[in-house]
């Protein structure tokens, strides 16, 4: 389960680029979970690339 803290997100788009199953997109100036969050692989690629620590992944 992935979530994005809008307050911390700078809208760089790195997480959207990194996600292998395209769950994340930039909407306006913030990233959002736009895919089916239950398809998250838990790979944490999005966490690794986020420069502002805005992405968290936890087990459902
Ligand atoms: S943990 Fe992996 S699959 Fe899940 S949203 Fe992040 S990059 Fe995508
Ligand atoms: S990588 Fe982090 S700061 Fe950049 S768009 Fe994604 S959540 Fe926002």
Image (spheres, grey):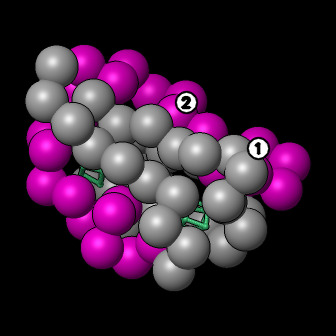
Front residue of 57 and 38? 57
Q: Is residue 60 left or right of residue 7?
A: left
Q: Which residues are magenta?
A: 26-50
- Image spot of residue 41 (x, y percent): 14, 41
**Residue 35 highlighted magenta (yes or no):** yes
Q: Secondary structure at mark 2?
A: loop
Q: Is residue 49 left or right of residue 29?
A: left
Q: Residue at x 83, y 56 (%)?
A: 29
Q: Neighbour class for label 2 at 10 Å: few (<14), some, many (≥20)?
A: few
- Distance from label 2 to label 1 (Cα)? 9 Å
Instruction: Return the residue at label 2.
Output: 34
Question: In this orientation, does residue 21 appear?
Answer: no
Q: Is residue 57 left or right of residue 50?
A: left
- Image spot of residue 54 (x, y percent): 52, 58
The disc placed on residue 1 is none
Q: Is residue 47 left or right of residue 12?
A: left
* Total number of numbered discs in the rendering: 2
Q: Quadrant of residue 52?
A: bottom right
Q: Of the two numbered discs 2 and 1 on the same chain, state the one appearing first in sequence.
A: 1
Instruction: Return the residue at label 1.
Output: 27
Front residue of 8 and 29? 8
Task: Say above or below: 38 vs 18.
Answer: above
Task: Say above or below: 18 vs 26.
Answer: below
Ligand number 2: quarter of image? bottom right
């Amino acid at each position: 389960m992935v979530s994005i803290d809008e307050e911390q997100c700078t809208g760089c788009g790195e997480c959207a680029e990194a996600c292998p199953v395209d769950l994340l997109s930039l909407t306006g100036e913030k990233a959002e979970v736009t895919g089916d969050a239950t398809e998250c692989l838990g790979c944490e690629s999005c966490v690794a690339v986020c420069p502002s620590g805005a992405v968290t992944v936890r087990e459902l």
